[in-house]
Image: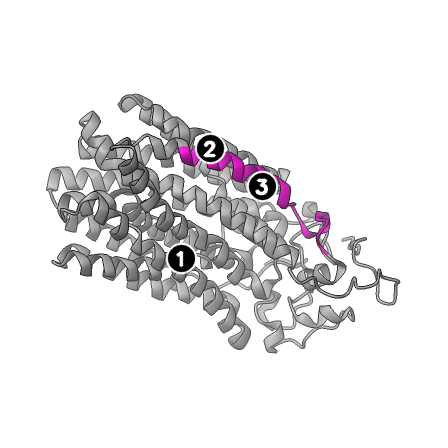
Amino acid sequence: MSVSPSPTLPPDGAARAPGADRPPRLRARWAVLAADFMVLGLNYADRAAIGVAAPYIIKEFGFSETAFGWILSIFAVSYAPFGLIGGWAADRFGPRKAMGWAALAWSAFTAATAAGVGFVSFLIIRILFGAAEGPQATVTAKLMNTWFPRRELGTAVGVANAATPLGGAVGTPVVVAVIEATNGNWRAPFVIFGVIGVLFAIGWFAVVRDSPEQHPWVRPAELREIRAPHGDRTARSGQGTRSEPGTPGDAGAPGEGDGSTEHDTRTAGGAAELESAQLPGMWHYVARPVIWATALAYFGYAWILNVFLTWFPTYLVNERGIDLAQLAVAGAIPWVGGCVGMIAGGVATDWLVRRLGAAATVRRWTIVICLVCTALLFGCIALVEDTGQAVALMAVIVFLLYFTGAQYWTVVAEEVPGPRYGSVAGVVQFIAGCAGFLAPLVTGAVVEHARSWATAFTIAVVIAVAGALLLAVAGRRKPARGTELP
């Protein structure tokens, strides 16, 4: 195996430009994170719009719950496979191009939703929209995995993905406000979001690069900080020292404090590079029990999320009898809980990993405990008589759900080396994305034929708990980011 130092990392004692060792006031990786945050926020605002506009679309076209369930679900027919394709594209072409072109495409199809004239046209538009939105999760995971040191990875993924519930929290009242301002025109918000998306995509291309080595804003000090072998902060001094195995500075590192001397293989520009050709293929990692269990737990997560995303506004209007003005608030409050939960989950698990070590175990059990609690509470929604209490309970549910949101990707990161990360994450996203097809369709059919929201919610409970329990019993494997893989 040939391992060569990155030319962007001068050896100790080499001359450096004055001030090069001083970290910039705003580190470039946080600017990249901010760009990703903005794009993901709009992504979910676009996606939430169909749920908010659903009562108007159903009324105008006379769709049944089952028919509209197909319109909602068909999104995932393309979303799931393009999550897989997005991971491959991020590995092959880089996350900058993969996300940038996807954002332009989903913005175009968001605007095209306004042109829907019947069942078939909505199906076609939603299939194309799903294909365009599919890559966003795996591309974000790849980008954060490349740009952030290991000890910050949970926080970075958590903050980035906090944009998704925030997009729902902001998008819901915005859609309501636009519909009210245009005298019930549900088409207007889709056009507005489409135009905004094109502007965001232009900003994305301006700010983001595939890796820190390629970005003109990255100083050598920040690059050494990102590429420090175990994510410790001794790299700031430029002395290349590292904490002893098993110390807090080593938490979350390869081998989780077991004395591993594995290299960081996240990018070809890292301080030590493991050539992609020398690694086992993608399916070597996909076959691991913990990867499959993570994917199935993520499937349970995605089932609850998609029921909430697509049907909760209709549930509030049709079952709880709230009006449009009340929907603007009631529909947004749970998303705020999700935003707080996503950030809190990433920060809290990073904190636990730094103090306890055993990164994979901490992150895995965070998913198990929170997903079980989420599911059990979700089953109680239809049993709560007061609408205000039901909305408050849903806020707690979405908080707990999103508390686990960053952990699926960090569990994968503990098992898979960087050159294979995007592809394996794409498989996980594909499996979870299947819930995006099944959950809205099954929920709509159950509500129409059984006339029972409680039954629909109970199905979600069973699926999520099953996924969590599978992850709880999955065989734990040591991280495999190094040169010798089990």
Q: Nearer the viewer, residue 249 or 284?
A: 249
Distance between the alpha carbons at the discs numbered 3 and 1: 23 Å
Residue corresponding to mark 2: 195
Relative image position of residue 241 (x, y in whole percent): 74, 73
Residue 236 found in image quarter? bottom right
**Per the image, is 461 magenta?**
no
Q: Is residue 14 left or right of residue 383?
A: right
**Secondary structure beneath disc 3?**
helix
Q: Residue at x 58, y 41 (%)?
A: 203
Nearest to viewer (mark 3 / mark 1): 3
**Per the image, is 204 magenta?**
yes
Residue 63 visible in image: no
Q: Nearer the viewer, residue 393 or 317?
A: 317
Tag 2: amino acid: Val
Q: Residue at x 49, y 58 (%)?
A: 159
Tag 1: amino acid: Cys
- Mark seen at residue 203: 3
Q: Is residue 251 left or right of residue 73?
A: right
Quarter of the image where the C terminus is located: bottom right
Q: How many marks?
A: 3
